[in-house]
Amino acid sequence: AAAEKAYQETIASADAAFEGKDYQTALSAYQKASGMKPEESYPKDQIAKVEGVLAEAAQEEADYQAAIKRGDEAFAAQKLEAAVAAFEEAKGIKANETYPTEKITEIQGIIAANQAKEEENQSTIAKADKAFEAESYAEAKTAYEAALKLKDEQYPKDQILAADEKLAELAAK
């Protein structure tokens, strides 16, 4: 009778741990209960169930960590869209984790700033082109230099040289 009572108490504590998602405690209690009554299938079935949950949780953690790693690597390489996609995946695996959400917010801010800078660059180049076409070469050169400060690319460099040539031609007249 004492052995039966101890078995029932062990099963009750194992079930309570399982319900409370304390799977390691549940596992050891079910293993203890199974040792007390090796002929009983319930503890063995529960051990299998707990091991399944633990394996699933381990796989989920591995998937989450892999997604975070991909996101961090893409972010470091300035592949911002890929980084957001990886952090979104991580967020889908573990919705309660704050890190992916924080990184997504940070990256979206960078993307917005980059877009604003690109728009400013395009606008500055358009202004420079307009001045160049109107033969206001000094004004065009100043605007191309401003565009070059925003974004280092070949077009404004070429146009600065062209403006310098036009200015030299005018000075030679």
Image (cartoon, helix red, strand yellow):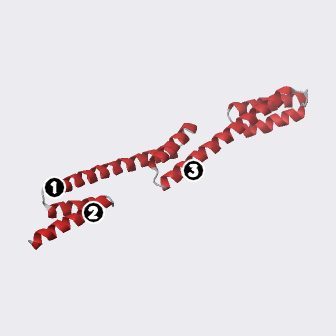
In this rendering, is residue 90 above or below 19? below
Q: Earlier in the sequence, mark 1 or mark 2?
A: 1
Residue 140 occupies which quadrant of the picture? bottom left
Identified at 20% across, 56% down, the residue is 128
Q: Which residue is mark 1?
A: 133
Which is more toward the observer, 122 or 166? 166
Q: Earlier in the sequence, mark 3 or mark 2?
A: 3
Whole-number angstrom distance, CA of label 1 to CA of label 2: 15 Å
Disc 2 element = helix
Q: Compare residues 25 and 143 and report the one nearer the observer.
A: 143
Q: Is residue 145 above or below residue 17?
A: below
Q: Is residue 106 above or below residue 92?
A: below
Could you tell whether 161 is left or right of 152 in the image? left
**Which quadrant holds residue 161?**
bottom left
Disc 3/disc 1 C-alpha distance (Å): 50 Å
> Mark 3 highlights which residue?
69
Q: Residue at x 51, y 47 (%)?
A: 99
Give the amino acid at mark 3.
Lys
In terms of depth relative to the viewer, which is nearer, 9 or 115?
A: 115
Find residue 90 and report its horizontal and vertical position in percent: 55, 42
Q: Secondary structure at mark 1?
A: helix
The one nearer the camera, 133 or 142, is: 133
Mark 2: amino acid? Asp
**In the image, is 109 to the left or to the right of 46?**
left
- State which mark lies toward you, 3 or 1: 1
Q: Residues within 10 Å of mark 2 (few under 14, many from 20)?
A: few
Residue 25 spot, x, y in % from top left: 75, 39
Residue type at the position of mark 1: Glu
**Total labels drawn:** 3
The x and y percentages for residue 79 are 46, 51
Quick check: marks 1 and 2 in contact, CB under 8 Å? no
Find disc 2 in the rendering and name its residue: 158
